[in-house]
Image (cartoon, grey):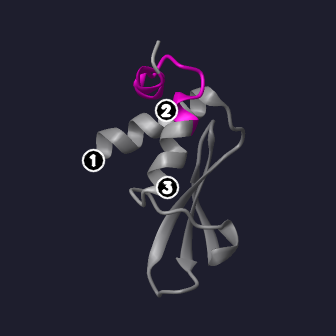
Amino acid sequence: MSKETKETDPKEPNYYNKWLEKSIANEYLNYYEYSEFKNLESIGNGSHGNVVRANWKNAGNFFALKTFKYYDNIMLKELVNEVINLN
């Protein structure tokens, strides 16, 4: 299997990690440190994690931050597929 095929094959073990890293590097997705937010207020939770409302320190806008109780390849796959479907 060629390198290009491995990078585009969702069945490859590191496909979703590489997709996320590449999307951040190419600025398709923005990456922020949790410490860049203030006034965190819980607005919901579920079996996988929590959602909080927060202000980004560099703007007055509110954001919804999704946090996860655990992180694994299945969770990352679901997150990547959610982002792809939203676009």
Query: Does residue 16 appear left or right of residue 68 in this picture?
Result: left
Query: Does residue 8 appear left or right of residue 32 in this picture?
Result: left
User: CB atoms at circles 1 and 3 under 8 Å apart?
Assistant: no
Q: Which mark is residue 24?
A: 3
- Residue at 50% of width from left, 56% of height from top? 25
Amino acid, disc 1: Asn
Return the residue at label 2. Answer: 78
Residue 6 within the magenta-colored segment of the rendering: yes
Dot 2 or dot 3, earlier in sequence: 3
Q: Disc 2 to disc 3, how far (Cα)?
A: 17 Å
Q: Disc 2 to disc 1, how far (Cα)?
A: 15 Å
* Magenta residues, start to end: 3-17
Q: Which is the main secondary structure of the residues drawn in magenta?
A: helix
Q: Going by the picture, which residue comes out furthest to the front?
A: 2
Q: Looking at the image, which is closer to me, 50 or 20?
A: 20
Return the residue at label 1. Answer: 87
Amino acid, disc 2: Glu
Can you give x and y, in whole percent of width and height, for residue 26 in the image? 42, 56
The answer to which quarter of the image holds residue 29 is bottom left
- Residue at 48% of width from left, 24% of height from top? 3
Residue 25 within the magenta-colored segment of the rendering: no
Q: Secondary structure at mark 2?
A: helix
Height in image: 4 above or below 68?
above
